[in-house]
Amino acid sequence: MIEIKDLHKSYQMGSNSLHVLKGLNFSIDEGELVAIMGSSGSGKSTLLNILGMLDEADTGEYTLDGVPIKNLNETKAAKYRNKFLGFVFQSFNLINYKTAMENVALPLYYQRVARKEREEKALKYLQQVGLKEWATHLPSELSGGQKQRVAIARAMAAEPKVLLADEPTGALDSKTSYEVMDLIQKINDQGNTILVVTHEEDIAHMCKRIVHLKDGVIVEDKKVEQVRASQYV
Ligand code: ADP
Ligand code: MG
């Protein structure tokens, strides 16, 4: 589903250059649940932004679902992004003046799905994350965990090939974090490919594989032998 080869990325700041990703290689199959783990500044978000086509690597190859991602113009990149990728962020990024259902339905609007179908799908995905009763509520009326579940429903409603989550539990307390990861595990159980960026060991161990990033290199890439369930973390 995802393959990267010798990926490099530097940031230029005036005459200085910061080499952030230093030749990364891995492939991720359909249906995997992978944690990209590493301490702050190790390059996790840089990597995820490249995988999410929000940014481009300087050199190296990136193939997504068989499509080489290289030198795409913004229109084409946006098209692939909508078709292939769902995003979840630490800060939820919900629209404050729209209800939970409207937030979930929004990406479908951009996919030109008709109103009735949008609403049906939005309700279906809200139900999947256990929030159907909250459909008409605004984000300000929801807890952090509920907001993140709405954001996950929104990402899933567009039926992406890959769900990319950058520190999805970063703004949540431990118990709520485990509940959100429990939901991510359930979505993965349905066959969805998911990448979770985290700096927390316990969150990473709720995934099936951990790619450990340190100073821009992969220092470890291992299968998790005993994937933790939320009640045992
Ligand atoms: P992580 O998500 O693991 O905390 P990042 O990928 O955000 O790490 O950042 C890796 C390094 O790159 C850090 O040193 C950060 O300060 C730097 N960095 C990130 N984004 C930019 C940018 N747009 N311009 C310059 N430096 C950046
Ligand atoms: Mg980050």
Image: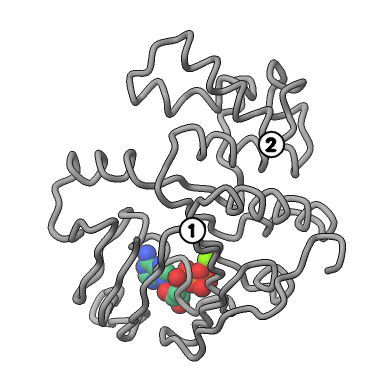
Q: CA distance from mark 1 to mark 2?
A: 19 Å
Residue 4 in the image: state x and y as whole percent.
Answer: 29, 73
Residue 8 seen in render = yes
Residue type beneath disc 2 = Val
Task: Please name whichever residue, 7 or 189, is drawn nearer the observer in this view of the structure.
Answer: 189
Q: Which secondary structure, mark 2?
A: loop
Position above or below: 80 against 26: above
Task: Please name whichever residue, 223 or 84, is drawn nearer the observer in this view of the structure.
Answer: 223
Residue 21 in the image: state x and y as whole percent.
Answer: 35, 80
Query: From this viewpoint, which residue is outermost toward the bottom?
Result: 219
Q: Is residue 111 left or right of residue 88?
A: left
**Which scheme is used to colour this image of the protein?**
one colour
For disc 1, the marked residue is 31
Residue 13 seen in render = no
Position above or below: 64 against 17: above
Q: Which secondary structure, mark 1?
A: loop
Say whether disc 1 or disc 2 marks the residue closer to the N-terminus: 1
- Residue in the image at 60% along x and 48% along y: 187
Task: Please name whichever residue, 156 or 75, is drawn nearer the observer in this view of the structure.
Answer: 156
Q: Quadrant of residue 139?
A: top right
